[in-house]
Image (cartoon, coloured by chain):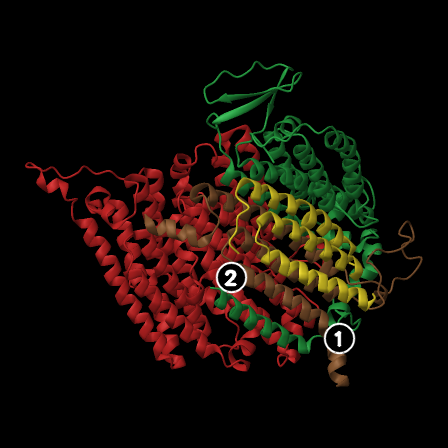
Chain colours: A yellow, B red, C brown, D green
Amino acid sequence: MIWQIDLAILTLVVIAGIGTIMVKDLLGAAILFGAYSFMMCLLWSVMGAVDVAFTEASVGAGVSTVFFAAAVFRTTRRTKD
Amino acid sequence: MSEQYPALLVVVPLLSALLISAAGWLKKRLCFPIAVVALGVAAYASIGLLIRVLNEGVIIYRLGGWPPPWGIAYYVDHLNGLVLAVVSVVAFINLIASQKSIEEEFPEKTGAFYTLYVLMVTGLLGIVVTGDAFNLYVLLEIASLTGYGLIAMGQKDRAPLASLNYLYMGTIGACFYLLGVGYLYIVTGSLNMVDIARILPPLYQSKAVLTAFIICMVGVWLKMALFPLHAWLPNAYTYAPSASSSLIAPLMTKVMIYVMIRLILTVFTPQFAFSNLAISNSIVWLAVLAIVMGAILALAQTNLKKMLTYVIIAEVGYMVGGAWLGNRAGMTGAILHIVNDALMTLCAFMVVSNIVYKVKGYAFEDLKGLLRKMPFTMGAFVIGALSIIGVPPTCGFFSKWYLISGALKAGHYGFMVALLFSSLVNVVLFFRVLEISYYEPFSNHHVGDHHPEPMAEAPLTMLVPLIIVAAGLVLVGLYTGDIVNHIIQFAIPKGIV
Amino acid sequence: MGDLIQLLVAKYNYWIYITLMMIGLYAMIAKNNLVKKIVGMNIFQTAIILFYVSIGSKKGGTIPIIEHGHGAAGSHVVHAADYINPLPHVLMLTAIVVSVATLGVALALAIKVYERYNTLEEDEILAQIREK
Amino acid sequence: MKITGLIIAILAGALLIYATADFPGWGDAASPASTHVSPRYIEKTMEETSVPNMVTAVLADYRGFDTMFETTVIFSAGVVCFILLRVFGSEEPKESLYRHVLTGVTIRVRAGGEIPPDSDDFERIDVMWTPFDLIIKTMCRILIPFIQLFGLYVIAHGHHSPGGGFQGGVILGASIILFAISHDLRTALRRIRERIDALLCATGVFIYAGTGALCLLLGLNFLDYAALASILGVDPITARSHGIFIVEIGVGIAVMATMIWIYNNVSSRGKYDEGL
C-alpha cells in the first residue's frame, strides 16, 4: 500500500466525518454520510479487505443512505446543529 | 441428547422465534403455544445442563466441530450454569403470566411481539453460555435490539423517546465493549476467553491490556446502568409495556453483571483485576454512590414502577460492589444476588403488571384500596418487598448477609453502611406503598352505607405464576446453603479467598 | 527525533481511527438533533470497524483469497505471511450488519418520536414534556 | 452538553491513544493477531473446506455461529421496525390524488370522497408526486434485471471471489428498493407483498439455523456441515463447501427481504400507502 494515497484518503475520511456532523441540514448530512462511507470503502479496499469494502459499498453507501433519506423525508430536514 | 444441551438451549428458541414470526402471519393462535414450548425446552435444557455440570464439571461444546481458538466454543461451568437456569426459568414464568396482557395490548402484533420476546431470551441465554468474546457482542446486540423494540411498544407518549435514549447509550456501551475486545485481540491474537486468559499473564503490564479492561468495564457498566451512567434506565423501564418490563428488568441488568463477573474471573483473571490494578477500592466506592443515590432517588418518586426502577439501580450497586470487594464472601454475595435479585425484581414487576392489568395505572393514587381488592397480588408484593428489604426467611436476606460479611472482611465499612442505609430506605419505600394500598379511595367514605369494594383479582393465569415466584423467593432463601455450597462455591476460582 | 518519526509512521493510522471514533462519540453526546446523533453513532461504529480491519492488514500480504483455487488443494503450499489475516474481516462483516440493523431501528424510533412531538430537536421535545 | 461531550470525547480519545504505545506497528506481519489464530485459517481453509475465499470459509464455517446470529440481528431489526411503525387498518388518508392517464389531469379526492373506479384510466399518485419521468423509469426498468443478476452472481460466486450471501442479499434488496423509488411503493408492493416479504425473512434465517439443526440431528455438533455428507452423497470436505453455499443462500434471502421490509416501513411510516 502506498502511504501517500493512504494518508490522502484518511484525510478525506476525517473531513467527510466532520462535515457530516457539522452540516446544518439533515438531507445534506445523509448524503455526506454516503460520501464518508464511500471513502471508508476505498480505504478498506486499499487495505486488502475486499469483502468488507464490498459490504460497506452496498450497505453503508447504498442502503444506509436510502434509509436516512427515507427517514428524513418522513420527518424533517430542519436541524439546529 | 444431553450432550447437545448447550446448542439446544439457544437453537430451539431461535428456530421457534422464526416459526412464531411465520405463525404471526398465517395462524395467530399458534404463536403463544410455540413460544411456551420453546422456552419450556430451553428451561428444561438449562436445568439439565446445570445438573450435568454439578456431576461432571465444566462442559465444552464445539460449535461446527472446530476446536476452540479457531471455532466458537460454549463453556458451561457452575457460574453460567446457574445464571442460565435463572434466565430461562424467569423468562418462562413471565411468558405464561403475561399472555393476557400481551394479547390485550397488541391485538394485531402478537406474532411480532412473541418473536421479539423469544429472540431476546435467545440473546440473553447466548450471552451467558458463550465462551467467545466476539460472539458475546453479537448476542448482546440481539438482546439489545429486541429490547429496544419491546420497550418502545409501551406508552405512546414517552416510550419511543425513552427507548431511543436507551439505544444511544446501549450502542455506546456495546461499541466500547467491542473496542475493548479489539484491543485485546491486537495484543493476544485470540478471541476465545480461555485462550485470552492463557496468553495474557505476561502482558499484564501492557497499556493496551489496561485500556482494554477499562473500556470493556465502562461498556458493561453503561449497559447495566451503574450509577453515573444510569440515566437511560428509569424512563425506559417505566414506560415499557408490562410484559416487556417484567422480562427486561429482571434479566438485562443481571446478565450484564454476569458478563462483568465473567470478564473479571475468566478473561482478565482476579489477580489482574484485584491485585495488579489498585482500583477495586474506588469501584466499590462508586457502587456505594450507586446504592445511596438509587435509594434517595427512589424516595422521590410518585409512582410504583419508577420507584422500582431506582431500586434496581441500587441493587446494581450491591452486585458491582460485592464483586469488586475482591474476596470470597463478597463474590458469593454478588453471584447469589444475581439469582435472588432476578427473582425479586420479577416478583415486583409481575405485581405491577397485575395492577396495571386491573387498575390501568401504577401511580401511587391508583393503588388505594388494593390490599382489599387484590389480596393475593398484594400478598405476593409483601413477600417481594420483604425480600428486597432483606428479612430472614426470604432469599434477599442471605445475599445481603454475604455481601455484608464480605464488606467486613475487606474492611470496607462504607459499603456496609450503604447496604444498611439502602435496606432502611427500602423499608420506608415499601411500607409507604402498603400504607397507601391499605386505605380505601376517598370517594367511598362519603357514601352513607359504604360497602367495601368487591375483590377484583387478576386472572388466574397471571396470579398463579406470581404466587409461584413469591413461594420461590422463600424456597430459594431456605435452600441458600445448598446453592452456595454446591454451586457458587465452585464458580469462584481458588485464587479468591 | 528519529524515534518520534518512526513512532509516527508506525502508529499514525491508529491515531486517525481514534480521532474518527471521537468525532462520532462527540456527535452522539453533544448533538441536539436525534438524527444527527444517529449519524454520529454510525460514524463511531464505522471507525471501530476501520480499527479492526487495520489489525488484519499485513505489509506484503495480498487479499485473503487463494489463487488458482480450483482443484489445486495441496498442489502448492500456502504461507500465512503471504495473505492478509481474514479473521478481522469476518468479524467486521458481522459488525457492519449490526450497525445497519441498529440504524434501521434507530430511524424507526426517531420517526415515532417525530410523529408524537413534531420535532427532532431534543431540547424542544423536553420542553414539550415539561409543559404537560 | 457540548462541553461535557467534548471533555468525554477527549478523555476517551486520550486513553485510547495512550494505549496505542504498546501496539505492534501498523501492518506488522509478526504481530500476535497475525501469528496466533489466523495462520490456520490461511493455510488450512483449502484442505478443510475447499473454499478459496478464506473470508467466506471463516464466516460461514469456522465462525458460522456468529454469522447465524448476524442474520438474526438483521431479522430482529426487521421485526422491530415492523412492530414499531406498522399501522394496520389505516384510516382513510386526508386526501388522495389520482391522475387521469390520457389527459394528465390530476384529481384531488378529499376524505370520504368518491374514489375513481379501478381502471387503467386513473392512476393513484403520491401527494409529493413528481411529474412522470420517462428516462428514469425506463432506465431503472432496464437496469434492475442486471442488478439482480449481479446480486445472484455475488451470492453464487462467494466461494471464489469477494462477496457472499450478505452482499448479494443487499444488492437484491437494493434493486427492489430502486424499483420502489423510481416507480412508487404501491407498484413495488404489488410485486412483493408484505406477508410474502415477512415470511421470506423468517425463511432465510430458518434455512441457516435449520441447516445447523440438521447437522445436529445427523449426529454431529450444531453447524458441523460434515454431517451433510451422507445426505449430499459427497465427501465431508466437499460437504462443508456445499453447506457454506446453502447457508449463504439463506443469508441472501433473509437480508434481501429484511432490507425491503425496513425500507417499506420507514419510507411509508408503516402505512404502506405512499413511499419515498
Q: Say if residue B19 shows up in the picture.
A: no
Of the two numbered discs 1 and 2 in the rendering, the one whose residue sits closer to the viewer? 2
Q: Nearer the viewer, residue D86 or B43?
A: D86
Q: Nearer the viewer, residue B107 or D182?
A: D182
Tell which residue pokes out farthest to the bottom in this image.
Answer: C1
Q: Is residue B54 above or below residue B444?
A: below
Give the image quarter of residue B421.
bottom left
| Residue indicated by mark 1 | C10
Question: What is the secondary structure assignment of the residue under circle 1?
Answer: helix
Spatial separation of the CA atoms under disc 1 and disc 2: 31 Å
Q: Chain of mark 1?
A: C
Residue neighbourhood size for the residue with mark 1, other residues' Cα within 10 Å, grouped as few (<14), some (14–19), many (≥20): some
Q: Is residue C35 visible?
A: yes
Q: Position of residue D98 (x, y in %)?
A: 58, 21
Query: Residue B302 at what x, y percent from top left?
Result: 27, 54
Q: Which mark is residue C29?
A: 2
Give the residue type that dot 1 points to.
Ala
Could you say which disc has been placed on residue B124 in the image? Answer: none
Q: Please report, as a chain letter, where disc 2 is located.
A: C
| Residue C96: image location, x then y, percent | 66, 53
Q: Residues within 10 Å of mark 2 (few under 14, many from 20)?
A: many
Which residue of the protein is positioned furthest toward the left in this rendering?
B448
Q: Quadrant of the C terminus of chain D?
A: top right
Q: Secondary structure at mark 2?
A: helix
Side of C115 where B344 appears, left or right: left
